[in-house]
Amino acid sequence: MIADEYYNYRAQLKGTDLQDPTNELGFIKIKLQQHSTTDITSDSFDPNPYLEALLPIACPFLAEFRVSIMPAKYAQTKFASRTGRYRHITTRIAELPSEAGKQIKESPLANDQNENKKIQNSLKQAFLHSQTSSTLQIIKFCTERCYKSTVKDGQLKILLPAKTNADNLVNKIDSFQYHFVYNSIKTIYADAYAQVKDEWKQTMPKVLHKRICSALDSLLPEETSSVLKKTYLMIIERESSVKMSEWFLPT
């Protein structure tokens, strides 16, 4: 066996100069020529296929070294073995290029923003996990009711008046030309929508904030810490704002 002969060769040269790689490769080449059925020339000599048999002799602690440099996520899994080898299985779908991955690589700023959002969500979940069940019910109740009440106020104070004014302008059109009527209606409702959108963005967040403050003042005891109350306010206002945006600008 080549490995055994190489071990004996190293033992015979113990104490001599073993740092010359030419002697090592020369010995391996001679032994491969003796054990190989094909002619091995200097140009075609490739010892790589035989390294698996030679490495344990040249490096007795190879298995421990492999274990020490093994990725931590594989060290305690079924893919690892005592020799330090592990199987890394990549699914076919993971090998396919994804547009999301390309966008993240192309825009580091978007990647940082996503990371910040993940951190904020983790902090929020950790904070909510430390609260009592009654407090969580108050947060959920305020989020749902303040969002729906604010949307209802916006409908009555902004959407319906704007729609009524737009309908009145449309009813005043007295032309019978198709293109003129079509363009006029399109312009009237587009202007009304733009006006409603601007007024909604300027007015409704303030209304929502006021409603949430009133709800928390009514439902929480007076000795509640101002820091806690402000944190509740931020959580409720954020979730309610998202729901309002989804309602007003559905995707």
Image (spheres, rainbow, N blue to C red):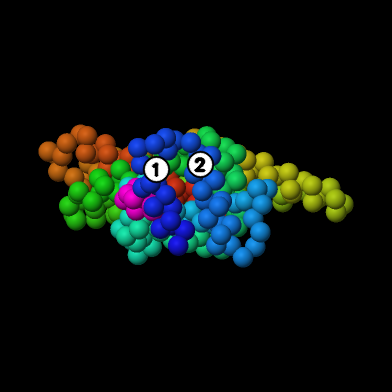
Give the amino acid type for the residue marked by disc 1 in the picture.
Answer: Leu
- What residue lies at 74% left-to-right and 49% top-to-bottom? 185
Q: Which residue is mark 2?
A: 23
Nearest the eye: 77 or 11: 11
Say above or below: 17 vs 91: above
Question: Where is residue 124 shown, x and y percent of the image?
Answer: 31, 45
Q: Amino acid at mark 2?
A: Asn
x 48%, y 61%: residue: 89
Q: Is residue 155 left or right of residue 193?
A: left
Tell me the magenta residue range.
Answer: 55-65
Horizontal side, residue 225 vs residue 203: left or right: left
Characterize the magenta stretch by its predominant secondary structure.
helix
Pointer 1 and pointer 2: residues touching (CB < 8 Å)?
Answer: yes
Residue 180 seen in the current view: yes
Q: Return the residue nearer the eye: 131 or 195.
A: 131
Q: Quadrant of residue 225?
A: top left
Q: Residue at x 24, y 55 (%)?
A: 137
Q: Earlier in the sequence, mark 1 or mark 2?
A: 1
Residue under label 1? 13
